[in-house]
Image (cartoon, helix red, strand yellow):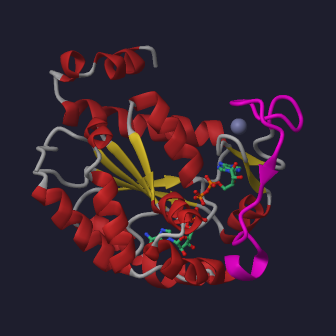
Amino acid sequence: MRDYSNVPVLILLGPPGAGKGTQAKVLEDQFGLVQLSTGDLLRQAVAAGTPAGKAAKSVMDSGGLVSDEIVINILRDRLADPDCAAGVILDGFPRTIPQAEALSELLASYGSQVHAAISLEVQDDAMVERISGRHTCDGCGEGYHETFKRPVVDGTCDKCGGQKFRRRADDNPETVRRRLVAYHNETAPLIAFYEKSGTLEALDAMGDIAAITEALRQIVRPIVVDVRGVHAASKNSKTAQMEETQ
Ligand code: ADP
Ligand code: ADP
Ligand code: ZN
C-alpha cells in the first residue's frame, strides 16, 4: 500500500448542477490534481457494459443513487492508480454518510485523510437553470453551457475543435427533480459530517464561473502547499511550476 500522507485530498460537495465538475477541471489544471468524478466513472462503466455499469444504469436513468457498494468499489480501484499520488479532487463522491465513512477508512489505510470538503452553495432555481443548459463536447468531454459557458467560436469546442456536442440523458426535468430529492435526503447531511470533523469550507457559488474559481483557489492553494510540504518542488517540479505561475 502506498503512502499518501502528503497527497492533498479535496472534496467538492454540492447539488447537481452546482458547478462541481466545471471547477474540479480547473483545479486539476491549476494545481496538478486528479479529478475523480464517480458520475464520469459510472458513465464509463455503463458504456463499457461492466457488471457494475449494468447494475448502475437504470438507477442513474431514474435519478436515484447507485448503491454505496458499487460506488465505493469503483472509487477504491481508481484511487489505487499511480496518478492519484499527485493529489485528488473528488467530485460527486461521497454522496452518503456510509460513503464518507468508507472514504475516511480508505484514506486512513494510505496514511491520509480528507483535507477539505468544500460545499458549493447554490439556490435551487440556479441549479435547474445550470443543468438545463449543460452540454459537453463529444470528442473531449469539455463542459459547456448554452448561456454561461459558450465556446469562443459558436459550435466549435475550444479544446479539441470538435463540432458535436451531447446532453446527458439524465439532465431532464423529471430526473433532475429526483436527483434534488436524493441530494437533500442523502447528500446534504455530509455538510454537518464534515463540519464536525473540522474540514468543511462553505462557498457561496452563485457568482459567475471565473469568480467561483478565484474563490476556490484562495481556499485550495494554502491547503495544497501545506499538505505537499516544502519538498513538493523537488518531488513534482511540473506542479510547482504551475503553482508559481498563478
Ligand atoms: P455539477 O458537476 O455540479 O453537476 P457542472 O460543473 O456540470 O455541475 O455545471 C453545470 C452546468 O452549469 C454546466 O453547463 C456549467 O457550464 C454551468 N456552470 C458551472 N458553474 C457555473 C456558474 N458559476 N454560473 C453559471 N453556470 C455555471
Ligand atoms: P451531477 O454532476 O449532476 O451531480 P453526476 O455526474 O455526479 O451528476 O452523477 C450522475 C449520476 O450518477 C447520479 O445521479 C447517480 O445516479 C450516480 N452517482 C454518481 N456519483 C454517485 C455516488 N457517489 N453515489 C451514488 N450514485 C452516484
Ligand atoms: Zn472538445
Residue visible at 41% across and 19% down in the picture: 242
Residue 180 appears in the picture as rendered: no
Tell whether 110 sits left or right of 150. Answer: left
Tell whether 200 sits left or right of 235. Answer: right
Above or below — where is 9 with respect to 190?
above
Measured as percent of width and height from the top left, residue 27 is found at 47, 37
Residue 67 appears in the picture as rendered: yes
Membership of 165 in magenta stretch: yes
Quarter of the figure with residue 217: top left
Measured as percent of width and height from the top left, residue 199 is found at 27, 56
Predominant secondary structure, magenta span: loop
Where are the magenta residues, as a range?
Answer: 151-176
Quadrant observed for ligand 3 in the rendered image: top right
Above or below — where is 30 with respect to 28?
above
Residue visible at 36% across and 32% down in the picture: 221
Residue visible at 53% across and 34% down in the picture: 214
Measured as percent of width and height from the top left, residue 213 is found at 55, 38
Quarter of the figure with residue 224: top left
Q: How many marks?
A: 0
Residue visible at 13% across and 59% down in the picture: 108
Q: Nearer the viewer, residue 108 or 43?
A: 43
Q: Nearer the viewer, residue 157 or 162?
A: 162
Measured as percent of width and height from the top left, residue 93 is found at 41, 64
Above or below — where is 71 with respect to 228?
below
Above or below — where is 51 with respect to 194?
below
Membership of 141 in magenta stretch: no
Quarter of the figure with residue 218: top left
